[in-house]
Image (spheres, rainbow, N blue to C red):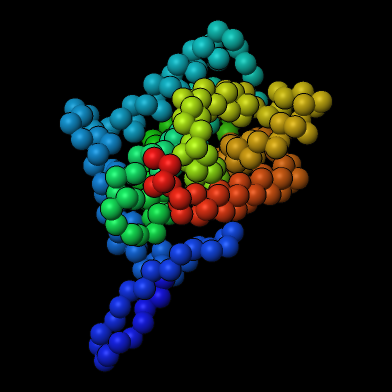
C-alpha cells in the first residue's frame, strides 16, 4: 500500500496485491494502531457483556482451577512439586497456561470469526490477532497480581521459596509467550479456512498440550529418555523459567531455553507466511 500525490494536499490511497512469501508491512500496521485499539475494546467488552461478574472471572477461573489441581494432583495423586507448596506451584503454571491457551484459542479463529468484516473493508488483517494478544495480556495482568498476592503470603509464612535474578527476565518470557501463541494461532487460523474440522480438534489439542507441559508436575519428574523430545515443547522452558524466577527451584537448562526460542521463532515465521498467503484468497473459500 502506498500514497500517491495528485495535487498539493491531495492524496489517493493505492492498494496493491501482496506478493512474495513474507509480505508484511510493519509501517502499515503501526498506521492502523487506532484500529487495533478499537478491536481490543471490542473483544474485551464482547467477552464479558451481559455477565454478572464480568472481569472477576479472570480471578475466579485460575483460583478454582488451582484449588482443583491442589486437591487432585497434590493431595490425591501426591505428585511431587520440588518442595514448593502445591497451591502456589500450580497457580504459577495455571497463570502462564491461561494466557497461552486463551490467546491461542482466540487467534486460531481469526479468519472464521471476522469473515464479515474482512469481506467489507480493507485493513491489515494482522491487527485482529494482535488485538487478541493485547486483550489476553490484560487478563494475564490481573491473574499475575493474584499470583503475586499469594506469593507474598506464602513467603511471609516461611515457605521454602525465594525470587532469583531471573525475575528481571519475566517480561522477556511474556514477550516470547505472546509471540508463540500469536504465531501458532494465526498458523492454525490459516489452516482452518481450508480444513474446517480442525477447529473441532482445537480444545482436545490444547488439553493434551497442557499435560505435555509441566503445569501439574515439575520438569524434574520427566524421565531422561523422554527429555530430548519433551523440550521441543516451547512452553516447557517458559513455565519452568517463570517458576525458577519466583521460586528458585527448577531443572531448566540453558539449551532448553535456546530450543524453546528456536521453535517459537519458527512457528511465528511459518504462521505469518501462511497467514499472508491465505488472506489473499480467504474470501473465495468462505
The quarter of the rendered structure image containing the N terminus is bottom left
Q: Is residue 94 left or right of residue 110?
A: right
Residue at 55% over, 26% down: 205
- The quarter of the image holding the C terminus is top left
Q: Could you tell me residue 9's position as x and y percent?
A: 25, 88
Name the residue located 33 percent from the left edge and 74 percent from the top edge. Answer: 13
Q: Residue furthest front?
A: 284
Q: Viewer-proximal residue, 222 or 197?
A: 197
Pick the front one: 120 or 68? 120
In the orientation shown, which residue stands out farthest toward the right? 225
Viewer-proximal residue among 102 and 60 = 102
* Residue 104 visible at all: no
Q: Position of residue 110 (x, y in %)?
A: 40, 43
Instruction: Give percent across and percent down for residue 60.
Output: 33, 26
Q: Outermost residue toward the top? A: 76
72, 114: nearer the viewer? 114
In the picture provided, is 174 more to the left or to the right than 80?
Answer: left
Instruction: Evaluate whether residue 61 shows in this view.
Output: yes
Numbered circles on residues, count? 0
Q: Is residue 1 above or below residue 93?
A: below
Q: Is residue 134 above or below residue 211?
A: below
The image position of residue 207, as x and y in percent, is 52, 24
7 shown above or below 202: below
What's the residue at 68%, 29% (across, down)?
A: 219
Q: Name the residue at 71% across, 27% down.
A: 220
Amino acid at each position: 500500500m502506498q500514497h500517491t500525490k495528485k495535487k498539493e494536499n491531495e492524496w489517493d490511497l493505492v492498494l496493491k496485491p501482496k506478493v512474495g512469501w513474507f509480505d508484511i508491512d510493519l509501517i502499515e500496521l503501526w498506521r492502523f494502531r487506532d484500529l487495533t485499539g478499537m478491536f481490543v475494546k471490542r473483544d474485551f467488552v464482547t467477552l464479558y457483556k451481559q455477565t454478572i461478574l464480568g472481569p472477576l472471572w479472570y480471578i475466579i477461573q485460575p483460583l478454582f482451577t488451582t484449588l482443583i489441581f491442589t486437591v487432585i494432583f497434590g493431595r490425591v495423586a501426591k505428585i511431587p512439586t520440588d518442595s514448593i507448596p502445591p497451591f502456589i506451584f500450580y497457580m504459577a503454571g495455571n497463570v502462564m497456561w491461561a494466557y497461552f491457551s486463551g490467546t491461542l484459542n482466540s487467534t486460531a479463529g481469526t479468519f472464521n470469526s471476522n469473515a464479515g468484516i474482512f469481506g467489507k473493508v480493507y485493513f491489515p488483517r494482522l491487527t485482529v490477532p494482535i488485538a487478541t494478544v493485547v486483550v489476553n495480556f490484560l487478563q494475564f495482568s490481573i491473574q499475575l497480581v493474584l499470583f503475586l498476592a499469594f506469593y507474598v503470603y506464602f513467603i511471609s509464612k516461611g515457605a521454602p521459596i525465594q525470587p532469583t535474578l531471573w525475575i528481571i527476565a519475566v517480561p522477556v518470557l511474556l514477550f516470547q509467550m505472546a509471540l508463540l501463541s500469536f504465531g501458532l494461532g494465526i498458523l492454525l487460523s490459516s489452516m482452518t479456512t481450508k480444513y474446517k474440522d480442525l477447529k473441532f480438534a482445537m480444545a482436545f489439542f490444547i488439553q493434551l498440550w497442557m499435560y505435555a507441559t509441566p503445569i501439574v508436575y515439575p520438569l524434574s519428574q520427566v524421565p531422561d529418555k523422554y527429555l530430548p523430545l519433551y523440550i521441543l515443547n516451547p512452553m516447557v522452558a517458559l513455565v519452568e523459567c517463570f517458576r525458577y524466577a519466583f521460586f528458585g527451584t527448577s531443572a531448566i537448562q540453558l539449551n532448553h531455553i535456546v530450543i524453546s526460542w528456536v521453535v517459537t521463532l519458527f512457528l511465528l515465521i511459518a504462521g505469518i507466511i501462511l497467514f499472508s498467503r491465505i488472506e489473499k484468497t480467504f474470501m473465495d473459500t468462505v
